[in-house]
Amino acid sequence: MLPIHELPDRLETERFVLRSWLPGDGPALREALLPSYAHLEPWMPWADPDPEPDELAMRVRTFRADWLTGTNFVVAVFDPTETRVLGGTGFHTRDSPYARGDAEVGMWIASPEAGKGLGQAVLRSMLDWGFGTWGWRRLEWRCDAENTTSMRVAERCGLVHEATLRGCWRHKTRGDVEVFALTADQWRS
C-alpha cells in the first residue's frame, strides 16, 4: 500500500479520465445528474431530481477533502477533455481504514452514457489501478439484487459472487444485496 500522501489522483485512458473531484466540478456534476435522475433513483439514495448547485459544490469539496485525508476516495469519470462528467466511481473504505487494504468499488453512469459498455470499462480500469498502483488487497462490489445490469458488470469483469445479504435496508425499503469481490491474487491470475 502506498502512503496516503503518495496516492495518485488521476488515471487517463483513451475513453475517459478517472480523477479526484476538485472544487469547481459541481456544475459538470449537476449537468450529468439532471438527465440521470430516473436512471439512478432506484439504486442511489443520493439521487435528486433537481440538485442544488451550492450543495453539489460542497459535495465535490467534501469528496476532495476526504481524498486528502485518506478517509474515502470518490472518483469522477470525465470524458477525455474533462469537460463532461460521464459518471462516478471510487474506492470506498466503508468498514476499514485505508492501511488495511480493503475497499468497496461503487459506480454510477450518467444516463446518456448507459448501455455503451462504459461501466465495464471503468470497473476494469478501477481494478487494474486499484490492485496495481494503489496496492489494494481486496476490492468488493455491492449492488441491489434487482439491479441486474450492475451484477452483469461485476461478473463480466471477473468479480466472484460471494454472498447475498438478505433483507438489508436498501435506499427506501428492505431487500437483498449481492456481494462480489476479488483479491489482488485473484486479479493477477
Image: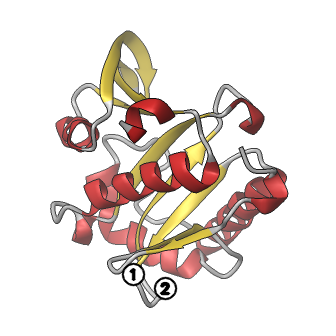
Q: Along the horizontal axis of the image, is 32 left or right of 150?
A: right
Task: Residue 140 in the image: state x and y as whole percent.
Answer: 46, 32
Q: Is residue 136 left or right of residue 161?
A: right
**Residue 141 visible to an observer of this rendering:** yes
* Helix, strand or loop status at disc 1: loop
**Looking at numbered disc 2 in the image, what kind of residue is underneath it?**
Glu
Element on which disc 2 rests:
loop
Q: Are marks 2 and 1 in contact (CB under 8 Å)?
A: yes
Task: Identify the residue shown where x is 48% and y is 85%.
Answer: 82
Q: In the figure, 36 relative to 85: above or below?
A: above
Residue placed farthest to the top in the image? Answer: 166
Q: Which mark is residue 165?
A: none
- Residue pointed to by mark 2: 82
- Residue 80 in percent (x, y) is at 41, 85
- Residue located at (61% from left, 67% from top): 56
Residue 176 in sight here: no
Q: Report the quarter where the C terminus lies.
A: top left
For the residue pair 97 and 142, the one nearer the viewer reads as 97
Neighbours of disc 1 within 10 Å: few (<14), some (14-19), many (20+): some
Q: Quadrant of residue 111?
A: bottom left
Q: Residues within 10 Å of mark 2 (few under 14, many from 20)?
A: some
Check disc 1 and give the amino acid type. Answer: Asp
Q: Residue at x 55, y 61 (%)?
A: 75
- How far apart in space, not on screen, are marks 2 and 1 (Cα)? 5 Å
Residue depicted at x 72% and y 59%: 7
**Residue 8 position in % (x across, y down):** 67, 65
Q: How many marks?
A: 2
Q: Which mark identifies residue 79? A: 1
